[in-house]
Amino acid sequence: MVYSDRSPALFPIIRDWLTGYHVFPMVPVPGMTPEVALRNLYKDAVYYGLPKLQQACRQAHEETLRVGRVQIGGTTI
């Protein structure tokens, strides 16, 4: 059994990233606003030492700032 003190809601996104799937735009994460989910995903990428996921999170954040909206699960909010 593996124990992690990180968010169990974000781990499937990290697992999908590690197996080569596209994770952006993100699907809704239960209990988190889109901004918080992206910020927490970035923090988990730092924690797990995943520099390419960190970069992808930064790019997603920059796109959010550029457009002024967040896209989650195909819905722009």
Image (cartoon, grey):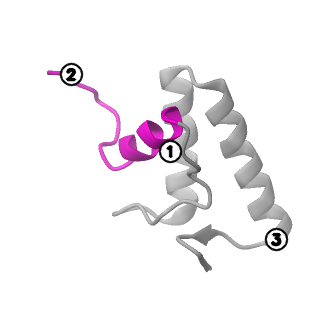
Which residue range is magenta in the image?
1-19
Residue found at the far right of this picture? 66
Res 6 label: none
Q: Position of residue 13 (x, y in %)?
A: 45, 46
Q: Quadrant of the C terminus?
A: bottom right
Name the element at disc 2: loop
Looking at the rendered image, the disc whose residue lies closer to the viewer, 2 or 1, is: 2
Residue placed under numbered mark 2 in the picture: 2
The residue lying at 33 percent from left, 50 percent from top is 9
Question: How far, Cα to Cα, is label 3 from label 2?
Answer: 39 Å
Q: Residue at x 48, y 35 (%)?
A: 19
Is residue 60 placed above or below 40 in the rendered structure?
below
The vertical placement of 12 against 47, above or below, is below
Total numbered circles: 3
Between discs 3 and 1, the one toward the N terminus: 1
> Which is more toward the observer, 56 or 41?
56
Residue 17 magenta: yes
Look at mark 3 in the image and give the residue it sits on. 67
Given the image, on which type of amino acid does mark 2 rest? Val
How far apart are the alpha carbons under marks 3 and 1?
21 Å
Residues tagged 2 and 1 counted as in contact (Cβ below 8 A): no
How many C-alpha atoms fall within 10 Å of the one at disc 1: few (<14), some, or many (≥20)? some
> Earlier along the polypeptide chain: callout 3 or callout 2?
2
Determine the residue positioned at 66% across, 44% down. 57
| Quadrant of the image occupied by residue 75 | bottom right
- Foreground mark, 3 or 2, reads 2
Mark 3 crowdedness (10 Å alpha carbons): few <14, some 14-19, many ≥20? few
Residue 40 is tagged as 1
Residue shown at 21% from the left, 24% from the top:
3
Q: Amino acid at mark 3?
A: Val
Which tag, 2 or 1, sits closer to the chain's start? 2
